[in-house]
Amino acid sequence: MIKWFKDITEADFELVGGKGYNLAKMFNQGMQVPNGFVILSTAYDTYGSLESVDETLMEEVYKAFDKMESGLVAVRSSSTVEDLPGLSFAGQYSTYLEVTRDDLKERIRGCWDSLNNERAIEYRLKNKITEGYSHAVVVQEMVNSHVSGIAFTSNPVSGVRDELVLNTAFGLGEAIVSGQVTPDHYLVDKSSGEIIESTLKENSLDGSMLKKLLEVCGKTEAFFGKPQDIEFAFDTSCKLFLLQSRDITTLFPMDAFERDDKFRAYLNTGTVMLGMKEPFTPLGFSIMSTMFPTIINVITARKKNLLTNSFVKHNAYRMYVDITYLMSSKFIAKQFANSFSGNDLPLKGVMNSVIEKYGNRFKGQGYRFRLPLGIIKYSIGLTGKLREIKKIPNAERYAAIRALGDKAFAVQKKIFDELRTDEERVSFAKEVLVEAFKLSQTMAMYCLDVNNLIKIEKVLKKHLPDKYQPEKLVQSLPGCITQTMMVDLNKYAEVLDEKGLEPSVEHVEFQKILETYGHRANIELDLGTERWREDPSYLLGLVKSYMVDQMYVRNLEDYESKRKQAEHMIEDICNDLISMGKTSLAKKMKKIMVNYRYGVAMREYPKSDIVRFLELGRKALFDVGHHLVKSGSLDKATDVFFLYSEEIYSGQDLKALVAEHKEIYEKEMKRTSIPRMVLSNGATYYTSTVIDPNADVLKGMALSPGSYEGTIRVVFDPKTTALKEGEILVTESTNPAWTPLFAAAGAIIMEYGGPMSHGGIVAREYGIPAVVGIPSATAVLKDGQRVRVNGETGIIEILTND
């Protein structure tokens, strides 16, 4: 039941565990690894439940021990779910050093027992590992360590791939791993070997040692093909030994990015532009990624050298865009950050941090900026339409904007009905999204009165300073589709409560709700995700929550109260101006403020219609999936969304591809920290600020005014949340699917977003305080904590940690 390193092959992984397998691979590659053997996992499976290690097994272990050159060994746990991609299990299991022959039995038992220690159990539960694991034990010759340490072949903090991080100390390395000593710290440039920075306590490395480490760490990383976390030791003759190597599991992946001579920058368009933190399904990415180059080709009127989607990358299943050409000009980069700060406030700080540190490396890698003639022509082409729209009274624009959307949708529906081949259906799914974008540009012109806020604030500041809060003008907007959805759901809850019924898809009232809002989804910009029409459980759950303690009564009363407040505020402002002798200005202001409310309300229609068009594209791809099921290529029609468009007709094993993509997608759904920017050297930028997780005060950016004290509820998925009325909603970001939760929330705290992002807009519409830009808010803040949120200063005070 043991195997020497030299006899271990790839087929033995489940027998020897992650640590044993990696050590054997290095040993058999000729790397300087101390000799040893592994007590196989079958031994644990057979004898692990016994109080003492079986004597027959120990006889075999003693025989192997006696063949070793050293009288002292290291006895180390090697779990079958340890040192796997994405799962290091570092420090979860037991390791014993300088073990004698007499102590072997006890130490083996200790390693076995550590499989079920509290730390290991918690780690497995966190990573949803509930079965299929066992435990092997490595017995390895001890190195008489003069200096030992840990090497990271990429910087685990910044993500930079061309930096080597070393932590070293005199004596045994376990003291470093367990935190018993403060090691020397070195940050080294891998290409030049120069020490970038160091914090020395004992000055444990000399120049020759550093040179050896650079060489060996480089070879080890190349051998495994990924950045490595390496434990090493120098003996008294300065001979270097490798004691362990495993993948650095905390690095953000870079598999989809270009690796060439350019120094590149990639922007996460999901969080910054689309307000989406979740991964894209492969087919959802294939469709959405074609939109960016097509839009640029359309608005620049390109006839040749058409852009393709090669600059859009599906990395970590998120959508990243290569913005190297923007970064080549500091001016353009800063203007770009400013233009999107409405969607994502922290982006500006992130972009400035990148420019400050790496700005010079981007020079000469982009294009000289000039405004393409096509954009000018495209803009001029819109002016005629804008003049027509301005002639339509605001009260009639609702009907006009809805009619515009319905007419365009009818055209696409006709095309959809006439699709005959699966190739046509895939092409249609791509084209319908572009048509939706074109429509949204026209519809946006109906909403230009949103810009009236600047005029309103200017007049109030000059004539009525500090008396009115213009943010109240966006509360309970007339005809706003996201707010009418909340009203309709609450009215349905009221009907059910009066009749003593539970919500059901069979009810006529609910069918009307699905008819109006069923095209939407919890992750609605990815057409690979199901729509509410397909699975209405989220909406049914919301209705049920509104029925608890008759929350619907308070929600509807609050909506009506805030509508009256907004309308009364308009009248009060006008009356104040009239009393000041500014009758003409009062008349003008009334029109501006009323139109502003209409403009903000109508702004939700373009978004809704984009999603409506996406649902049509999803239906077309569903048909493709059904045909692939009939041909035996797929098991389920929905599996088609786990294929890239180019894979559908590639002739490959589609079922195998789907299984592979699903595994990655499900893993990426668990990823909660997504960098806004990633550079080609691996540097990751999540936010421009770092917070102390133990601080009592957190500083973010104000999104929606007001102050509120309540308890925290961290939410990752609106479908599964247990958010109660009055709780403070803490999340990464929100989209329209989250809107009904705002009716229950007392305040909002988000990691991503800006004044013009969904969370910021809806928080102001509902009149609840909101703060954005708290790094890792979903990790730092815990359910049940009591905090005070100030939506005017961006400050969050942690009052209790219950």
Image: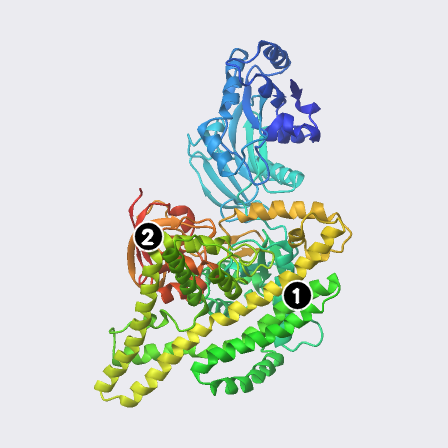
> Relative to 66, is 801 on the left or the right?
left
Residue drawn at x 24%, y 83% as measured from the top left? 575
Query: Dividing the image into 4 quarters, which one contains the N terminus?
Result: top right
Q: Earlier in the sequence, mark 2 or mark 1?
A: 1
* Figure coloring: rainbow
Q: As rendered, which of 348 and 369 lies closer to the eye?
A: 348
Examine the rendering and report whether any part of residue 328 can be seen.
no
Q: Which residue in the rendered view is the most extreme toward the left?
A: 579
Residue that numbered label 2 is attached to: 549
* Picture disc at residue 430: 1
Total labels drawn: 2
- Compare residues 326 and 709 and report the one nearer the observer: 709
- In the displayed structure, 44 sits above or below 543; it is above
Q: Residue at x 52, y 87 (%)?
A: 388
Q: Amino acid at mark 2?
A: Asp
Residue at the image point whose x is 47% and y is 88% from the top = 391
- The residue carrying pointer 1 sits among few (fewer than 14), some (14 to 19) or many (20 or more) residues within 10 Å by Cα, namely many
CA neighbours of label 2 inside 10 A, class few (<14), some (14 to 19), many (20+): few
Residue 677 seen anywhere in this rendered image of the structure: yes
SS at circle 1: helix
Q: Is residue 282 above or below residue 339?
A: above
